[in-house]
Image: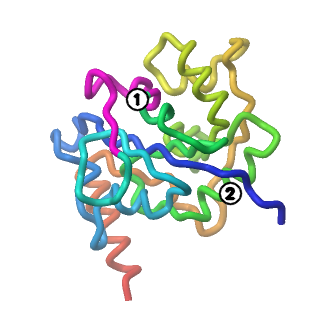
Amino acid sequence: MERLEGCDSVILAGGRARRMGGADKPGLEAGGATLLERVAAAAPGRVVVVGPPRERPRAEYVREDPPGAGPVPALRAGAARVAEPWTAVLAGDLPFLRPEDVSALRAAARGRHGAVMVDADGREQWLLGVWRTERLRAALEAYPGASLRGLFSSPGDVRAFDFARVPLGEGAELAAFDCDTPEELDRARELLRRRSP
């Protein structure tokens, strides 16, 4: 199998978590580790976390200016620190993400600008993708909007990305499961509890 080019990771972990009552969502525990630690364990290369500094996981921590400005400014801040040709863009609340899920995205992105996971309903998960670093930075520099969907999928736009849509494969059914609400966090904890020996 052809060796994949180098890939660093940007994890967005500084949102307001309104549906979680304003809690420090990436710092919440599930299955003996924080959500952020679980994502970092699956992330390739050097890990850049956009959010408040933490003792764990070990990573480079940066902040968008101003903090809390949204996912596009956060991604700009993180992408500026990437050294490898590819960038994995990940949410900080994906408790079931595995390294092989990111590897599947990297393989699907060959010959294109990137690849994004799509959930069971066919919706792109913009915070679960892999992108060519130079192309991502150029698009971020030119993009005036605030939406990640707008950044990656503006039809007919010169910034438009050519990307693969990767469905959740066997064993990856929960890769895109995120914890936006207390109920989703409880569900993740229960599923992880059942999986533990």
Label 1 and label 2: CA atoms lie apart by 24 Å
Which disc, if any, is residue 104?
Answer: 2
Q: Secondary structure at mark 1?
A: helix
User: Disc 2 marks which amino acid?
Assistant: Ala
Front-lying residue, 192 or 29 = 29
Point out the stretch of residues depicted in magenta: 61-76
Quadrant in which residue 132 is drawn = top right
70 in magenta = yes
Q: At 33% across and 44% down in the image, what residue appears?
A: 61
Q: What residue lies at 73% left-to-right and 12% top-to-bottom?
A: 156
Q: Is residue 189 left or right of residue 7?
A: left
Q: Estimate how packed mark 1 is, as few (under 14), some (14 to 19) or many (20 or more) residues with alpha carbons within 10 Å.
A: many
Quarter of image, res 164: top right
Tell me the quadrant of the picture where the C terminus can be found. Answer: bottom left
> Quarter holding the N terminus?
bottom right
Q: Residue furthest front?
A: 83
For the residue marked with disc 1, what is the amino acid?
Pro
Nearest to the observer: residue 180 or residue 132 = 132
- Return the residue at label 1: 71
Give the answer, above or below, for where 60 lies relative to 147.
below
Image coordinates for residue 165, horizontal then vertical, percent: 69, 42
Q: In the image, what residue occupies the spot 17% across and 45% down? A: 23
Rendered residue at 36%/79% (across/down): 194
Q: Say which element carries label 2.
A: helix
- Please report whichever mark, 1 or 2, sits nearer to the chain's N-terminal start: 1
